[in-house]
Image (cartoon, helix red, strand yellow):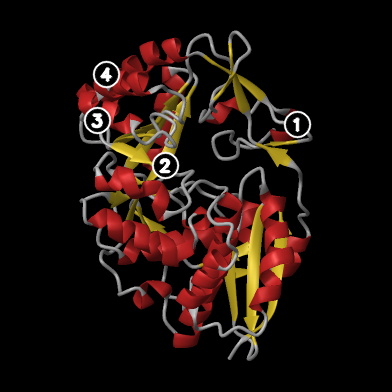
Amino acid sequence: MSIDRAEVIVTSPDRNFVTLKLTTADGVTGLGDATLNGRELAVVSYLKDHVVPLLIGRDESRIEDTWQFLYRGAYWRRGPVTMAAIAAVDMALWDIKGKTANMPVYQLLGGASRRGLLAYGHASGKTLDELFDSIRSHQEQGYRAIRVQTGVPGLKSIYGIASNATYEANKGVRYDHEPAQRGALPHEEDWDTRSYLRHIPTVFEAVRNEFGPELPLLHDAHHRLTPIQAARLGKSLEPYDLFWLEDCTPAENQEALRLVRRHTTTPLAIGEIFNTVWDYQQIIREQLIDYVRSAVTHTGGITHLKKVLDYASQYQIKSGMHGPTDISPVGMAAAMHLGLAIHNFGIQEYMKHGEKTDAVFEQSFTWQDGYLHPGDRPGLGVELDVDGAGRYPYVQAYLPYNRLHDGTVHDW
């Protein structure tokens, strides 16, 4: 067998997705997710112009060899565009291998290590009442763990608040599910760290008073704090027993996490913008984090992220794979298969896709009592309706950016 055809399919049912479809000489197909929110067409070009010509005629069973060929053979390594493209190829090859073996991918990875994957949802509100309603709604949907994001007095629109969908082009879309604004230019938001640091502990105190001590709570600081500010936040949130504090400071400055660790015992989750094991080398070895946040889609696929998580397991660090709606159902399926198989699974981010997306991507996963399972269909368990995808052409969209009150561009 060999790869006979490779297609790059761009569709925008509820948001933009990039999917690679590989077909073998005897008609077996495999899908891979190459979506990179706000920079989708860069990956499309990388795949179409540089990767697809290298795939035709290759033995589809040689997953590791193909991964090394695409990574080392390009000479220019790493980065989100390269690693998303490699991830798409890798997922598609695992999908084909599972279909050929008539087994779900998690069985090929060693079989299930658990019955299902604990998942967390995204509750948010500009006010406490709105936040409480959102938490209750997520509990009614079955979530057993909940990320809490809140408005900050004096700030108009900040990351992660569902009701902040104020952009005309995004009306009717939950802002926390799709913050990328459809249009020619990114939306500008405002930020003030001191106001945020004063406000957040009072929110978590209120949430604990209302919902009790047992509910696992998570929070995302979204790269916006300096190391000492992150240390202060972690320490101030200790009384509220967070499951984790995510992206407390820009992760590129890995030594900064030493300072944060010295000041707080709040568990830390880092890595959704990381792409390789080399990004994690220091912070895993020094045990500066507790959860690996990378997505299969952005970290070279199942083959590479499994190696990252195997390395993390030596230091009792667990998975917390990135799973917002800009990870397509194909990428989510890959995360579920990997999460089900590894021993050091921690939790899975899960944001439900829209109805149009679910119609274009036919899926086999289950969601029951707060747990995900990828299903037992051979391969990844996702099929793409190519004709349906064609009804939703690409729409230009950008993630927002931040400015401080004095006009300085700040981390979003």
Q: Where is residue 6 in the image (x, y as percent from the top left)?
A: 69, 74
Q: Mark 2 points at which residue?
A: 121
In the rendered structure, are the residues bearing label 4 and label 3 in contact, judged by CB atoms less than 8 Å apart? no
Gap between marks 2 and 4 measured at Cα:
23 Å
Instruction: Name which of mark 1 and mark 3 comes first in the sequence.
Output: 1
Q: Name the residue under label 4.
A: 236
Q: Which amino acid does label 2 sit on?
A: Gly
Mark 2 Cα within 10 Å, few/some/many (few <14, many 20+)? many
Instruction: Name which of mark 4 and mark 1 comes first in the sequence.
Output: 1
Q: Name the residue under label 3.
A: 261
| Of marks 2 and 4, the one in the foreground | 4
The secondary structure type at the circle numbered 4 is helix
Instruction: Name which of mark 2 and mark 3 comes first in the sequence.
Output: 2
Q: Mark 1 points at which residue?
A: 185
Q: Which of 110 and 275 is in front in this view?
A: 275
The tally of labels here is: 4
Mark 4 Cα within 10 Å, few/some/many (few <14, many 20+)? some
For the point 72% across and 52% down, the residue is 41
Instruction: Name which of mark 1 and mark 2 comes first in the sequence.
Output: 2
Gap between marks 1 and 3 measured at Cα:
38 Å
Q: What residue type is labelled 4?
A: Ser
Q: Is residue 282 above or below residue 181?
A: below
The reply, left or right, for residue 370 in relation to residue 56 is left
